Image (spheres, helix red, strand yellow):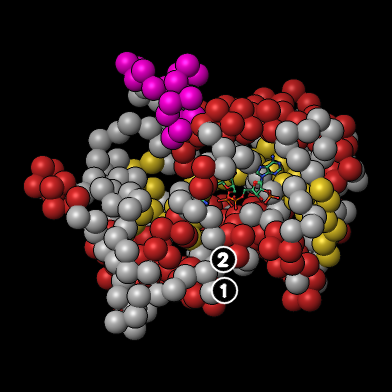
Amino acid sequence: MPCVRASDGPVAVTGASGFVGSHVVLALMKRGYTVHGCVTDLAHPAKIDHLKAFEDRTPGHLELFRANLLEDGSYDAPFAGCSAVLHVGTAMAYGGANNSRQVYEGAVEGTQRVLASLERAGSIRRLVYTSSFAAIGHPAPPGYVFSENDWASQNRTGDPDWSLDRIDVNGETAYAMAKVETEHLVNRTALADGGFDAVSVCPLVVLGPLLSPAHHLVFSWQWFLGRMLRGKPCKRAWQALWNIVDVRDVGEAQARILESELCKNGDRYQLSATDRSGELNVNQLQEQLQTLFPRIAVGGAPPEMDEYLAKYGKVYDAPRAYCDRARRELKLETHPIEDTLRETGQSLLDLGLIEPALR
Ligand SMILES: NC(=O)c1ccc[n+]([C@@H]2O[C@H](COP(=O)([O-])OP(=O)(O)OC[C@H]3O[C@@H](n4cnc5c(N)ncnc54)[C@H](OP(=O)(O)O)[C@@H]3O)[C@@H](O)[C@H]2O)c1
């Protein structure tokens, strides 16, 4: 299918107001696209004001539409006349907003509705789907290096959790199963339709500048980093590595996929660390933040770490994964890890979202 350019007409973004979605909109508007930004609530300033401000700093244009993944036909109006759709939005579990069944069913049924509106529009040539590394990572020995060839459904023989019967009790599996299912769904539908290609991105730990207070989502990676700047111990993934990708790179990669002549239906791009510098254990994360924010007493490993190390000797060497394919095929130039960490912390401070623990 031919690639897309800004001159081909508007492109639509679902979940436009979210942390990732906002950076997708910004990357597109920087390239001069007219973006149909889909949000659930047009009356919520923290969800839309930062998007409207892109009009002043980019050559692009923005039209906002109210749309909801839970409603049939909701995307018919925003997709009409578009050349591409970037499907970023989904029901997330942040702060207990959705239980694991709502996360699973919201993703699958929401994507079915997006595909139905896309096919009714009849003008869309490319769908970029925001999947997740959750659709890639599977049980593997420490040190295993994941790539786009891996699927979360692998190595599950004898794993009782990898079952639709268990989605009510295991949120992580529900999310991973939803992302595997929806990736296959968008590719199957594109193949049968023949009029558009579906390409997925699979981000790992997304950090980088928050653009709105609405991006300070309880239990998100950026929220846990902010917690460390508040002097509190790291409470997420301290037993393993934070494998980090910059949210600006996630946005830029999606804009590049639209315009790539190489991309075809079924392609997927793992968006993760550039190299070992982006794979940090909790001590390395604390050290880097401490260097970047010398006046703050940055929190580090939680008290449970001593017991963990006594038992296992070291933190789990996973997930190891690099965004080589995106760098090679999309010519994506990634942000250095120091810049990503600095911009995450600085935006939390500038937006007044955290009270730092000063030394
Ligand atoms: N952040 C990460 O580390 C990470 C890693 C891998 C993959 N991802 C993927 O990236 C995407 C965005 O996640 P995020 O971290 O940026 O979270 P986020 O800020 O919470 O964004 C989620 C978006 O989904 C939209 N949404 C939720 N329920 C909806 C509904 N019923 N109808 C329409 N839209 C709905 C929200 O729209 P409103 O704000 O308008 O309600 C919001 O814009 C997700 O697909 C997620 O799986 C994120």
Number of the front mark, 1 or 2: 1
Within 10 Å of disc 1 (Cα), the crowding (few <14, some 14-19, many 20+) is few
Picture disc at residue 351: 1
Magenta span: predominant SS is loop
Q: Is residue 66 above or below residue 288?
A: above
- The residue where tag 2 is placed is 210
Q: Is residue 219 visible?
A: yes
325 in relation to 157, above or below: below
Tell me, yes or no, if residue 92 can be seen here.
no
User: Is 193 in front, or is 220?
Assistant: 220
* Quarter residue 147 falls in: top left
Residue 244 located left or right of residue 108: left
Q: Secondary structure at mark 1?
A: loop
- Magenta stretch: includes residue 167: yes
The answer to whether the residue labelled 1 contacts the one labelled 2, judged by CB atoms less than 8 Å apart, is yes
Relative image position of residue 342 (x, y in whole percent): 44, 74
Query: Is 46 on the left or on the right of 289, as rendered?
Result: right
Q: Amino acid at mark 1?
A: Leu
Q: Give the magenta range.
A: 157-174
Residue at left offset 89%, top offset 43%: 77
**Residue type pointed to by label 2:** Leu
Q: Earlier in the sequence, mark 1 or mark 2?
A: 2
* Furthest residue toward left: 310
